[in-house]
Image (tube, helix red, strand yellow):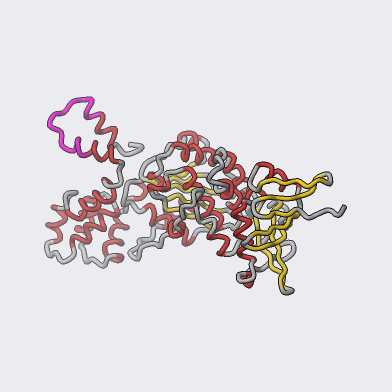
Amino acid sequence: MAKMTPLVRGDRLIYQQDEHEQVLAVETPAWFAWLATASTFAFTSDNGTFTARKERAGNQRGGWYWKAYRTQHGKHSSLYLGKAEALTLERLNAVARALAPESSGDAGGAADGERPSPPTEEVERHFMTTRHGDPLLATKLHVPQPPLQLVHRPHLVERLQQAVERPLTLIAAPAGFGKTTLLSTWLEHASLQAAWISLEHDDDDLTRFWSYVFTALSRVHPGSGTSALALLQASTLTPLPPIEIVLTVWINDLAALPHEVALVLDDYHLITAQPIHRSITYLLDHLPPQLHLVIATRADPPLSLARLRARGHLTEIRAADLRFTAEETAAFLTRALGLELSAQDIATLEARTEGWIAGLQLAALSMQGRKDIPGFLEAITGSHRYIIDYLVEEVLARQPEPVQTFLLQTAILERLQGSLCEAVMGEMREPGE
C-alpha cells in the first residue's frame, strides 16, 4: 500500500499511521504533537494550496522551522511558515493566500542554507491583531522623532549606551522631563536595534500587551515573536496558556538571535494590571543576553527594583538627572527657541522652573511678544495659564478617577490633622523622595 502524504484539508489533518488512516483537528494538542514528529504535509483550502516541509536554519541555532512551497507554471515560490508552535489554521490560510496565483509574483524563496525570508506584508497583516481580533495600531511601534528644538545631551546618551550592559534601564520622572525625547535621541545613534511600544490605557491587558511586544520584536528580527504570538492568537475558544509558557517560547527564540536588541516600553505607568507586572518580572528573571529592556515611566513599577539594584542589573535615570543644567537652559532658550535673553533672565527662569523642560517650553511661549521680560520672570508661577493647561491635560486628566477625586477633595483643606497630612503627602510624594 503506497504511503500517502499527510494532508490538511480545511481544519482537519488526514494521515497514515500503522497503515490506518487517522484524522485529527488542526490547533489541538494532538496537532502540535504530530508536527514534532512530521517532516512534510500538504495543505489545501479555499485560500490556496502548498506543500509544507520542516527544515533547519542554516546557523544551526534557530532550530527547526516549517516552510511552504508551491510550483505553478514552472515557477517555484516559497514562504516562511514558522516554528511548529506558529502553525495555526489562520497562519496556514494566510500563507496559502500569499502563495495563490494572484499574489505569488512577490513571493520569493530563501537560498539554500540561509534563514528563510520573513512573511510578506499580506501575511504580516494577519498578525497585527490581538487574540480577539482587535487590530494593533502600527504607529505605536514607531520610534518618535526627536523635536526640532533639540538640546543635545551627550552625557545622558552615553549613560544609556553604557546601560545596555545591564538587563534593565529605568527612566522614571514626572511628565515633561524629556524621557521620550532622550530615548529617541539615543536610538538615532545607538549601536543596537530597538523595538518600541508607546503604551496607552487600553494596553493594560495581558494579551494585548504581549501582542504588541511580540509584534514589535518580530518587526526588528522577523520570526522572533511569531511562535509566541501564535500561541496568544491560537483560538478565541481555547483558554490562554500560562503566560510563562508563552514567554518561554519567545525567550528561546530570542536566545538564538545573532544581534542585541532593545525593547522600549514608553509610558509604562499606564500599566496597572498585576499579571503584566508579574510577566515582566518573569522576563527579567530569564532575560537572554541579546535583549535589553528599557522602561520609561512617571512612577516606579512594581518590579523588585531593590533586588535588581543589589545584583547590579539596573540602570536608573531620574528627574534629577533629566533636569536641564544652566548651560542646557541657555542653549534651549537662545539657540533652540531663538529668544534673546540676558544671562540674568536665563538664570532666573532656570531657578523658577528648576530645570523642568516642559516648564521652560511653556514659559518661553508665554514670553513671546512681552517687553518686560524680567518682570514676567519674577511673577511667573504654577498658576500661569499655559502651565495650568499642561498640568491639567498631562497630569491630572491622566490620573485614575479615584486619584482625581482625592486630589480635588484635598487641594484646599479647611482643617489640618496628622493623619490627613500623612495621607496627602503619601499620595503626592515623588518616588524615592
The foreground one among 429 and 274 is 274
x 44%, y 55%: residue = 157
The foreground one among 131 and 154 is 131
Q: Position of residue 339 (x, y in %)?
A: 23, 66
x 56%, y 64%: residue = 122
For the question of whether residue 220 can be seen, the reply is yes
User: Magenta includes 412?
Assistant: yes
x 35%, y 61%: residue = 151
**Which residue sits furthest top?**
418
Q: How many marks?
A: 0
Boundaries of the magenta span: 408-422
User: Magenta includes 141?
Assistant: no
Is 92 drawn above or below residue 432 in the view shown? Answer: below
Quadrant placement of the C terminus:
top left
Left or right of 386, for residue 97 = right
Residue 269: name its quadrant. top left
Q: Position of residue 267 (x, y in %)?
A: 39, 49
Q: Position of residue 367 (x, y in %)?
A: 18, 61
